[in-house]
């Protein structure tokens, strides 16, 4: 009777491994994307806070982009991914967002489109 069940544990392990490996990889990748989103949220918040507290003279948008990139840059994050919007209506507001940044993933790329985003009222006109 024992000879008939020999090797069945290896086959069960192979089936379980084939199902659990992509599941665990997906959990890890999703967790990394959430962590990266939170990190980018802190960076755009710092950029929006910097933009709200200074005048709009000179190379204003590039200064804000550099603040976002230097805070904690995600791998592959470029200045063209950081968007700066100024609403001049009363009250004036500055919005900084990440748009078009792609995070390569095992199970498919994750693209950030306008999120994370932070908006602050202008402190300096």
Image (cartoon, rainbow, N blue to C red):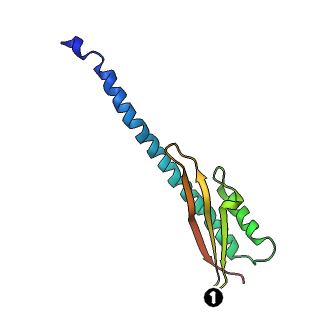
Q: Position of residue 2 (x, y in %)?
A: 21, 13
- Residue at point 69%, 56% (across, down): 78
Q: Secondary structure at mark 1?
A: loop
Report the residue marked by disc 1. 90
- Residue at point 65%, 83% (across, down): 92
Q: Is residue 48 above or below residue 92?
A: above
- Residue at point 72%, 84% (across, down): 125
Work out which quarter of the rendered image holds the N terminus and state it.
Answer: top left
Q: How many marks?
A: 1
Q: Position of residue 45 (x, y in %)?
A: 61, 67
Q: Is residue 10 above or below residue 27?
A: above
Q: Quadrant of residue 48?
A: bottom right
Residue 62 placement, left or right of 117? right
Q: Quadrant of residue 19?
A: top left
Viewer-proximal residue, 6 or 55? 6
- Residue at point 59%, 59% (across, down): 40
**Residue lying furthest right in this view?**
58
Q: Position of residue 32 (x, y in %)?
A: 52, 49
Residue 20 placement, left or right of 113? left
Q: Quadrant of residue 86?
A: bottom right
**Residue lying furthest bottom in this view?**
90
Residue 35 placement, left or right of 55? left
Q: Position of residue 116 (x, y in %)?
A: 56, 64
Viewer-proximal residue, 100 or 3? 100
Viewer-proximal residue, 96 or 106? 106
Residue 19 placement, left or right of 121? left
């Amino acid at each position: 009777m024992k000879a008939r069940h020999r090797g069945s544990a290896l086959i069960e392990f192979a089936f379980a491994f084939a199902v659990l490996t992509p599941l665990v990889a997906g959990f890890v990748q999703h967790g990394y994307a959430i962590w990266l989103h939170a990190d980018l949220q802190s960076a755009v918040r710092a950029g929006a806070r910097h933009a709200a507290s200074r005048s709009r003279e000179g190379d204003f948008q590039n200064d804000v982009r550099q603040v976002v990139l230097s805070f904690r840059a995600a791998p592959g994050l470029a200045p063209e991914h950081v968007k700066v919007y100024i609403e001049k209506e009363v009250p004036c507001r500055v919005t900084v967002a990440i748009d078009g940044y792609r995070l390569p993933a095992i199970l498919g790329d994750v693209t950030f489109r306008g999120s994370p985003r932070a908006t602050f009222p202008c402190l300096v006109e």
